[in-house]
Amino acid sequence: MKAIKLSALFLLLVCSIKIKAQQVAHTDFVASTAKYDFSKIWVSDSIADLDEEIENKKIKAAEAIGFIGDNYQRFYIHLISVIKDIEKPNEYFAYGKTMVKNNICSFQGKIKITEAGFYKESDKPKFKQGFIVADILFFEDQKSISAGSIKGKLTTHFALDAKGNMFYDTINMMADGFSNNEFVGAWTGYKSKITKKCNWGDYRIPGCGDLDIGAGEFSVNEKYLKNGWENYQLAYAHNYNSPESKIAFKKESEKWWK
């Protein structure tokens, strides 16, 4: 078991080094982001599979996975609507819902792009790969139980084709450690004034410590399963065809925000 864990850690380290090396990027793009609408990257039922040569092939967009607090309690978030601010084109109005355990809160807030750039090299020559970093400030409905505000930074990866069409970056989507829309921040309760770490992302969660023990894909550490992760682990366990996994997967696919 020790050898397996060391191997997994080595793979994650290699992946991390590769990502950091790729992020030596041109950072003169932020002034041009105003002409693009990034809302479709944050709110979409389906996204283009850029790894496939089949034009216009679509795949289901991922639901963010996240945690809140030092015990890595599972945290759900879904952006229902994101609208570009006409007067401040690098800012967006956002509306959505969060869920912790059985407590669902609606929220409103803003996404403000503060950094942007292109990578010097692309993993797929026909596309230009880039990133944006945005400040997020969301306010949950004060009438809800245990409501609060969420503040932090969101990093989103995108790709442009030769015509300037923008896509959610799915290049090398099957590679170990693939992720997108990574948020790092904190939740602060209105009444309690308690601040808790709150991170999320598509496919992987940034800064999640020992919660994620997967090498190739997100996998929950057994000691945190009771903190809201049991159904997730069962749904995406290796025994996909078992009746239990099918039931769990169906539950994971429920649109809890409606």
Image (tube, rainbow, N blue to C red):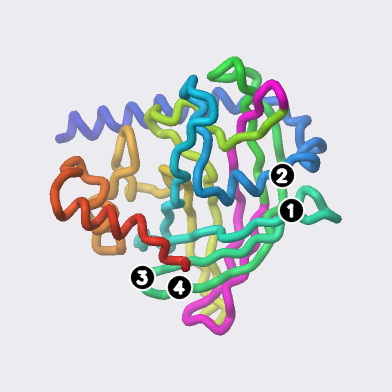
Q: Is residue 115 visible?
A: yes
Residue contact at pointers 4 and 3, CB within 8 angstroms: no
Residue 37 is marked as 2
Circle 3 or circle 2, nearest the eye: 2
Q: Tell me the chief SS of the magenta region.
A: strand
Residue 101 is marked as 3
Residue 112 is left or right of residue 40, and the answer is right
Residue 84 is marked as 1
Question: What is the secondary structure assignment of the residue under circle 1?
Answer: strand
Residue at the (33%, 45%) spot, across then down: 212
Residue 133 is left or right of residue 209, and the answer is right
Question: What is the secondary structure assignment of the residue under circle 2?
Answer: loop
Label 1 and label 3: CA atoms lie apart by 31 Å
Ranked by sequence position, the earlier of labels 2 and 1 is 2
Residue at the (69%, 21%) spot, across then down: 162
Circle 1 or circle 4, nearest the eye: 1
Q: Which residues are magenta?
A: 135-163
